[in-house]
Amino acid sequence: MFAGRIDELRTIDRCLIQTKHANPQHFLVAGERGIGKSSILLCETFVARGMIETNDSSRKLNFITLEISLSERDDYYNVLKKIATELKRRVDAENKLRAFTMTALDYLSRIEAGGVRFNRNPGSAEPEDIFNRLQDDLVRVLTSLENHDGMLLLVDEADKAPAEASLGAICKLVTEELTRRQCDRLCIGLAGLPSLLDTLKASHESSVRLFQTMNLKPLDDDECEQVIETGMKEATEKMAFLLLLPPTRGPRFANYLRDTRIFYKNLRILHLRKIMIM
Ligand SMILES: Nc1ncnc2c1ncn2[C@@H]1O[C@H](COP(=O)(O)OP(=O)(O)O)[C@@H](O)[C@H]1O
Ligand SMILES: [Mg+2]
């Protein structure tokens, strides 16, 4: 039931295809709450994994995808931990990569198991060490990707983490290091409220320039109509059997549907009206 967003999907497709050819491009989806940022990320996860084709060709990609979401409570340490945990989860799920030991996560677990109070500031020894280990892990996985086009790291709700979590600096340093090590097959995609741009700048002045930024506007009238039409049609088809129940037995939402004009319109389409009016 996804409608519109053709330009945005094409832009992200291009980022992925460029990344596949060792010329990584990164993107940022900015927009107000509910405008459709997460939906675009989800759609492109399917494209990246090859579950659906790219928008402008019948090409299928084969990326490993890492998906994380940030929150207000995330500091620098948490952001690194979320990426390392997701990397381990994905590597474990890939038969051919399972033999890898992810050193960043092992290191984190050891520190946490030891009950050591963690110094959470960037620049202090432990986070620096975790960061280096995470980079090594990424390089190790990326250089072993024989059957994959590359890796897509998606960070949703990226605006939520405060500037001190240093997301901008993390993206900048990771991409530079991967280029230096000729390991250029990581594409990073961020999504968040428009304030994300300022948060990234505060974390690292030039980090915003890494990303192709897309500012989402509301869907146009035709696209909205398309969503409503498709939604009602799907709902009516799925609910048709419930609507055969007498009003007192059916769930409340079935009764609600019964009362709407659009429902009667769809009932006519499904030729069920006669049965319902009995
Ligand atoms: N392009 C679209 N087509 C159809 N439904 C959409 C589209 N974009 C968003 N939606 C719907 O709108 C709601 C909010 O979208 P979401 O992606 O969660 O927004 P955001 O992440 O910007 O807060 C969801 O229920 C989603 O299914
Ligand atoms: Mg969202």
Image: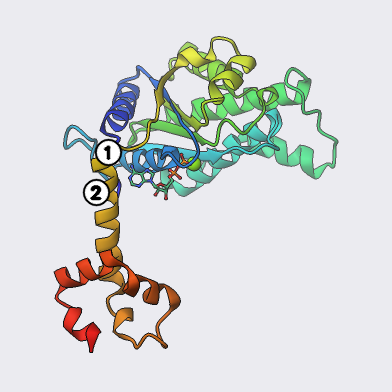
Question: Eyeballing the image, is 153 above or below 52?
Answer: above
Return the residue at label 2. 226
The residue lying at 67 percent from left, 26 percent from top is 165
The quadrant of the image that shows the C terminus is bottom left
Query: Residue flagged by tag 1: what amino acid is it?
Result: Gly
SS assignment at label 2? helix
Cβ atoms at labels 1 and 2 below 8 Å apart: yes
Return the residue at label 1. 4
* Mark 2 C-beta closer than 8 Å to ligand 1: no
Percent coordinates x, y for residue 118 in the rendering:
81, 33
* Mark 1 C-beta closer than 8 Å to ligand 1: yes
Task: Assess disc 1: are there few (<14), some (14-19) or many (≥20) residues with their C-alpha within 10 Å of its C-alpha.
Answer: some
The mark total stands at 2
SS assignment at label 1? loop
Q: In screen coordinates, is 104 left or right of 184?
A: right
The residue lying at 38 percent from left, 20 percent from top is 25
Residue 181: in sight, yes or no?
Answer: no
How far apart are the alpha carbons under marks 1 and 2? 9 Å
Query: Residue flagged by tag 2: what amino acid is it?
Result: Gln
Q: In screen coordinates, is 164 left or right of 236?
A: right
Residue 32: in sight, yes or no?
Answer: yes
Q: Nearer the viewer, mark 1 or mark 2?
A: 2
